[in-house]
Amino acid sequence: MDIPTAIASFALAAGLMTLTPGIDTALVLRTAAVDNARDALYAAIGIVAGVFVWGLVAACGLGALLAVSDSAYRLVKFAGAAYLVWLGVGMLRSAMTGHERGEGTSGTSPRERGQSARGWLLRGLGTNLLNPKVGVFYVSFLPQFMPAGVDVVAFSTLLAAIHAVLTLAWFVLLIAATRPFARALAKPSVTRSLDGITGTVIIGFGLRLALSPSAR
């Protein structure tokens, strides 16, 4: 396999993987629908940063530790499961009590907007980094697209960057798709329903991650 073929093949495979719904997609869509496009974009950037970090970790060989060590895998797995359950419970609480929609920014100070941006970026980053299956996936996925004679770390980093760009482009499209429905999504009954559904889904992901078998 030559370099252009490897890049094209990886881009196709990564694109199909990006389109597969998962916890990251649920988080971005919920944030765009219930909060605002700006916060959803920051969550998406955090997720994309996590994708790139996992690619670098796999490229450096550290990701293999998750694939062979039950202890390392379980540590990340249970931390990720606890985080997802915490995130989901927070959304369920919002569904029951209601909250102010963050659509407007005119009454929000720059400091508050900055804190909100950091918060959503860290949520996206944490959601991705605390999923050990992403690391195991990269360890088994990237080697299939390594042409002979290339610098493995450099080429793996390039492939991870391609995946990150595809992921960000997909999330931007998803966020843009919610904008025509912004007025309808702003209704309290709708936002509470979305929080309830998404919170339940995220808790389900967390429980499934906690109960999943070891990496071996």
Image (cartoon, helix red, strand yellow):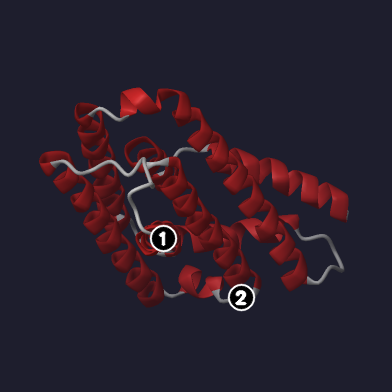
- Specify the amino acid type for callout 2: Gly
Quadrant of image for the C terminus: bottom left
Q: Is residue 43 above or below residue 186?
A: below
x and y percentages locating residue 84 in the rendered image: 29, 56
Q: Residues within 10 Å of mark 2 (few under 14, many from 20)?
A: few
Viewer-closest of 198 and 31:
31
Marker disc for residue 61: 2
x and y percentages locating residue 158 in the rendered image: 74, 61
The residue at the point 54 percent across, 61 percent down is: 49
So how many labels did they put on this image? 2
Mark 1 element type: helix
The residue at the point 14 percent across, 47 percent down is: 93
Q: Is residue 110 above or below residue 37?
A: below
Viewer-closest of 101 and 55:
101
Residue wearing tag 1: 110
Query: N-terminal of the two: label 1 or label 2?
Result: 2
x and y percentages locating residue 119 in the rendered image: 37, 61
Q: Is residue 1 visible?
A: no
The residue at the point 23 percent across, 55 percent down is: 85
The residue at the point 38 percent across, 47 percent down is: 105
Q: Farthest residue in the left direction?
A: 97
- Specify the amino acid type for callout 1: Pro
x and y percentages locating residue 154 in the rendered image: 76, 70
Marker disc for residue 31: none
Q: What whole-number distance in Å separates the C-alpha atoms at marks 1 and 2?
A: 41 Å
Viewer-closest of 213 and 45:
45
Q: Is residue 170 visible?
A: yes
Q: Residues within 10 Å of mark 1 (few under 14, many from 20)?
A: few
Q: Quadrant of residue 200?
A: top left
Mark 2 element type: loop
